[in-house]
Image: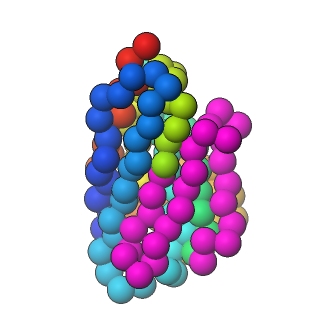
């Protein structure tokens, strides 16, 4: 089992940057594929980015590709989401998620473990 705690959210102007962090408990962090999702008010939770256990595979939604970068530091049990060129439509609560075995990285239902979320607000 793994517990996840996100941090790094906040208020930023459009065009700005933020870096989210997700710290995981436990000693088997590198056994877990990690994902970032977001949920805006009145909308369903949507996939943002994911990274494989070793970090060798990364996946992005079309809406963030080229602007966001997911990475992980297995020695620190942490996954990051670097968000650049932020837009007002990126405003949402951002969640990190983990699972050991994932065939489809984009589906929230495939992740067993979730953090509590961190708010990102982009002002235009």
Q: Say how many tags the image has.
A: 0
Residue lying furthest front? 16
Q: Residue lying at the far bottom in this picture: please name it.
A: 27
**Is 80 contained in the magenta span?**
yes
Query: Is residue 123 depicted above or below 114 in this figure?
Result: above
Front one among 39 and 86: 86
**Vertical placement of 42 versus 97: above or below?**
above
Residue 115 appears in the picture as rendered: no
Colouring of the image? rainbow
Image position, residue 81 (x, y; %): 48, 51
Q: Is residue 83 left or right of residue 78?
A: right
Residue 55 location, quadrant: bottom right
Q: Position of residue 51 (x, y in %)?
A: 59, 63
Span of residues in magenta: 54-81
Look at the image and tell me whether residue 21 can be seen.
yes
**Where in the figure is residue 111, as x and y percent of width and height?**
51, 60
Q: Quadrant of the N terminus?
A: bottom left
Q: Is residue 23 above or below residue 6?
A: below
Q: Residue at x 35, y 28 (%)?
A: 12
**In the drawing, does residue 101 fall left or right of residue 3?**
right
Q: Nearer the viewer, residue 42 or 58?
A: 58
Q: Tell me if residue 74 comes above or below residue 116 in the rendering.
A: below
Q: Quadrant of the C terminus?
A: top left
Determine the residue positioned at 65% across, 33% down: 63
On the image, the x and y values in percent for residue 110 come to 57, 59
- The structure residue drawn at horizontal position 38% and vertical position 74%, both measured from the top left corner, is 77
Q: Residue at x 32, y 41 (%)?
A: 9
């Amino acid at each position: 089992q793994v517990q996840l705690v996100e941090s790094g959210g906040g208020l930023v102007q459009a065009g700005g940057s933020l870096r989210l962090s997700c710290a995981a408990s436990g000693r088997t962090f590198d056994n877990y594929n990690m994902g970032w999702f977001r949920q805006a008010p009145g909308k369903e939770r949507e996939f943002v980015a994911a990274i494989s256990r070793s970090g060798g595979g990364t996946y992005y939604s079309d809406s963030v590709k080229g602007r966001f970068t997911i990475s992980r530091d297995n020695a620190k049990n942490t996954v990051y989401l670097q968000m650049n060129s932020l837009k007002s439509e990126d405003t949402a609560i951002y969640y990190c998620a983990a699972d050991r075995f994932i065939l489809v990285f984009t589906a929230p239902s495939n992740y067993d473990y979730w953090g509590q979320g961190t708010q990102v607000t982009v002002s235009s």
